[in-house]
Structures are given as structure tokens and as C-alpha cells.
Amino acid sequence: RRKMTALQHISLPKSGPENRNRGKETVTFQGRVSDGMKTGSEDPGFNMSPAVDHEGPLRMKPNPTDTVDSGRPEISKAEPAIQRMSWSDDGCNLTANYSIGCHFIGRGDYGWDEPRQRTFQTELKSVIEETFNNNSYRMTPSAARQDTNWLEENVLDYIPWVNYDCPCASGYTPQVNVEVSGHGSSMSEWGVYVSANPEGGFVQSRVTEGTGFLDEGDVNPGSGGQIGAVHEFGHYIGLHHPGRNVELAEDEDEYSYAGRDEHGNEVEGAVDLMGEGMGLRPFYFNAWLERLNNEYPGCNFTIGT
């Protein structure tokens, strides 16, 4: 019942709309599209939100009143949507598998041709995987053996190929695998609209449920060293800004906040990926931890370095 030979497809909660980078964020909201707005249904080749059930379609574009041009942005407080990914277990590596479908906007603009688009796809995969997979965390069991019931302990445990020991005593490593396709495949979990930006200048980027809005420069470090596409991917998998829903000092905002977040996790906005930097936190991998503890009840996996 509990022995894990092939990890199967499951569904996990993720965050609602989130945004990034002070001064260039757009606040988006759940709900119906305003009159005259275009929706993903007008483009049959691209599924805006394949993993989300909505009361109404999502906005492709924000209303002008939703745009925050300066100062502290107002962040949407939408309820979590549904995120789907698959898992694979290779030895003591537990890998979350994601797929991203790119829909390139303005195909002929600024030389935004297929070779450059393929380069963006390759770099998007690379920056996400390199950031998350270079983590130093291990998820280790606190017990030697899983919880068992009478049947498991007195009957099934005597079958040679059944094993209720807690696996990987030295710890699992959380990993990410990202497959990126072009032209907004309807099979992709995360649909991303990508605009040309050959000069790498200031272009607004954001994430709504199931849909990202990026530009060509988002796979490169910004002036503060953060790679915008990785920050946005963090929002897609359910992560929030460090200072979300906490009381902020006058010289702080959601990105720069340092202390305890709304869930009691230690955060430091200046260095954290979900703030202004590229650093990772143990709780970024809570979904991995939950997967193991559901698969191996009683092993009580914890995460640390």
C-alpha cells in the first residue's frame, strides 16, 4: 500500500495572481473579462489556464486602473487555484515535473524570429532548473519505519518485495524538471505570453492563474541580480512575496521585508527569490515534503541542510 515504486500524477494547490518587481507590476484580479477584452478562447492554439476551473475567463490584459506605475503595489488577494504536475522518484531525488508553453507575441517585431524564440525557450528552462536544483536542502525521515496497520504488519510485511522501512535515510533532494515548448501547446500546465525585448529594457511582467506574461529579457539578471522569469515561476508554483499580508515598516514593502512571513517562516527580502534576490528558502519545497509524508505516513520527513 505504501511502497513507492512509481510516483503518480497528483494535484496540488497554488497561489492566485501575483506580480513582481516594484514599479513594473500589474495588478490582476480573478473574474470575468471586461467587455471588449480578448480571452484565450479566441486562440485555439493556446490554453490560457489548462489546470484551473474559473467562474469566468481570465483577463488577457489589465484595465488601465489596475496598473501600478510607482510606489508600493497593491497585491491581489485571490484565493488559490489548482496546479497540476507529475512527480518522479530517481533514487533519492524527488523531482516535480512541469511543462511551460510559450506563446510568442508579435512574431515579426524586432526580429522576433523562430531561432530567437527557441533560444528563449532553452534559456527559460535553464534558469529555472539551475536556480531550484542547486539547492542544498535534504528531506530526511525522522523515523526508521512507516506506520502500519495490522494487515501490513502481520501479513504484507512478510512478502519479500514489500518494504515498510522509511526510504533514503540520508535524505531526498528536491528537484525541478521543466519542459518548455513553443506556440502555446494546449497540453502545457503554464501558458506564457512572451514579447520581444532585444534591448533588454523595462517591460512589465506578471502572472495570473495559469498564465504568465513575460518578455525576452526576463531570462537575464536585472539590475539587482534577480532573474525575473524565475521569480514569476515561483509565483506559479504557489510562492508569495516575503512581506505579503504582514505589517510593514515605513521603509519596507512586500519585496524587501525581512522577518517572519504570514506563516511564520523566516524571510529576508533582499536575498530571497520571492523578494529581490535569487536565494531559496526551505519552505519553497513544502510541496515536495508533503508528497513524501503522504506517500510514507509515519516517516515524518523534515527539510533542512
Image (cartoon, rainbow, N blue to C red):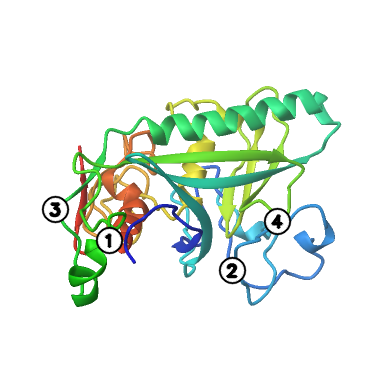
* Residue 23 position in % (x across, y down): 51, 42
* Crowd band around label 1 with a 10 angstrom C-alpha radius: few (<14), some (14–19), many (20+): few
Q: Quadrant of residue 130?
A: top left
Foreground disc of the pair 3, 1? 1
Q: Secondary structure at mark 4?
A: loop
Judged left or right of residue 98, residue 250 is: left
Task: Work out whether mark 2 precedes mark 1 in sequence or the reverse, and give the earlier one.
Answer: 2
Which amino acid, by three-letter code, is at mark 4? Lys
Residue underneath mark 3: 144
Could you say whether the residue bearing mark 1 is in a helix, strand or loop? loop
Q: Which mark is residue 159?
A: 1
CB-based contact (under 8 Å), mark 4 and mark 1: no
Residue underneath mark 2: 30
- Label ID, residue 61: 4
Give the distance between the C-alpha atoms of the residues marked 3 and 4, in whole angstroms: 52 Å
What amino acid does circle 1 point to? Ile
Q: Is residue 126 above or below residue 260?
A: above
Question: How far apart are labels 4 and 1 at the CA level?
Answer: 58 Å
